[in-house]
Amino acid sequence: MAADAEHDASRRGDPDLAEELERALAEHQFLLLYQPTIDLKDDAFVGVEALLRWRHPIRGTISPDEFLPVLESTGLINAVGSWVLTTACRQGADWYARGHRFSVSINVSRQQLEQPSLPSEVARALADSTFDPRHLVLEFSERTLAGGAELRATLERLKETGVQLAIDDFGMEPGNASLLESLPIDIVKIDRTFVSDLSTSTSHAARVHQLVQLGQLRHVQTVAQGIEDDDQRLRLQSENVDVGQGFLFSVPHDAEAIDRFLEDYAIFSGKPL
């Protein structure tokens, strides 16, 4: 089956793919890669985002774009999300024990957020791993955060565990300012769409400026995603964006490669880790 056909099938809820994903979870075929985030003010290494991948025994490493819809449609997203949470906390605790003080971010789906047990699950993962909750960031898409009082109550309970909360792909949905007014958000991640053509699109450049100003007004950290060249980095610095993430700094790595990246980056930047 061609890649496009496979992708279309996954979105329709291919039962064969669903069965494969159940087997993948049972046989530990999922893995996390980690993409560094860099402070744009002083080039310090400040964190990583954990990114889910499927290490398929025949097809190799598969991006979540191909299988995430099936995880969501079958409810497997909750079990896989729990695995991501546990694995990221353990890895973060390992880095922390070796003297590395930086954040680890994970993505949380709408289905996970709707589970009343999520705050206690997060608290348990933090306690079991001994990972400092201040260094765990839970990321939610703007669309995920469209909800009422019940959603806010869950987010408040998550904040009580000591973690940070972030809005991913910020700026794509209408009414984003109201999210910062009504929800306990610490970080906004500006969508890569606005970063990719900063130098050629005046509307996107204006949008980035607006989002940064909004973040500053609400006292939340701003992160720009998808930075691929120095021109983008310099323009984002001029807008006073706090943190950058993208291929300019690093592709995603497995945990072992991140250890090497940390050493190399410390030498290159002159910044102790």
Image (cartoon, rainbow, N blue to C red):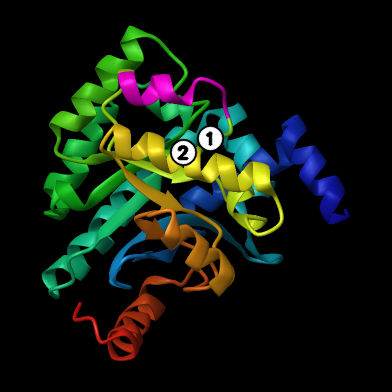
Label 2 vs label 1: CA separation? 7 Å
Question: Label 1 belongs to which residue?
Answer: 171
Q: Are there few (<14), some (14-19), or many (20+) residues within 10 Å of tag 1?
A: many
**Which amino acid type corresponds to the residue marked 2 in the rendered image?**
Leu
Query: What residue is at 57 percent from the left and 31 percent from the top?
Result: 72
Q: Where is residue 157? Give x, y as percent.
A: 19, 24
Quarter in which the C terminus is drawn: bottom left
Q: Where is residue 52? Give x, y as percent.
A: 50, 54
- In this view, the residue in front, 38 or 85, is 38
Residue range of the region highlighted in magenta in the rendering? 173-181
Relative height, residue 104 to residue 222 (above, below)? below
Verify CB contact (< 8 Å) between mark 2 and mark 1.
yes
Label 1 secondary element: loop
Q: In the drawing, does residue 266 fall left or right of residue 231?
A: left
Q: Are there few (<14), some (14-19), or many (20+) residues within 10 Å of tag 2?
A: many
Q: Where is residue 90? Give x, y as percent.
A: 24, 58
Question: Label 2 belongs to which residue?
Answer: 211
Relative height, residue 171 to residue 237 (above, below)? above
Query: What residue is at 21 percent from the left and 69 percent from the top?
Result: 95
Q: Is residue 6 magenta?
A: no
Query: What residue is at 52 percent from the left and 71 percent from the top?
Result: 251
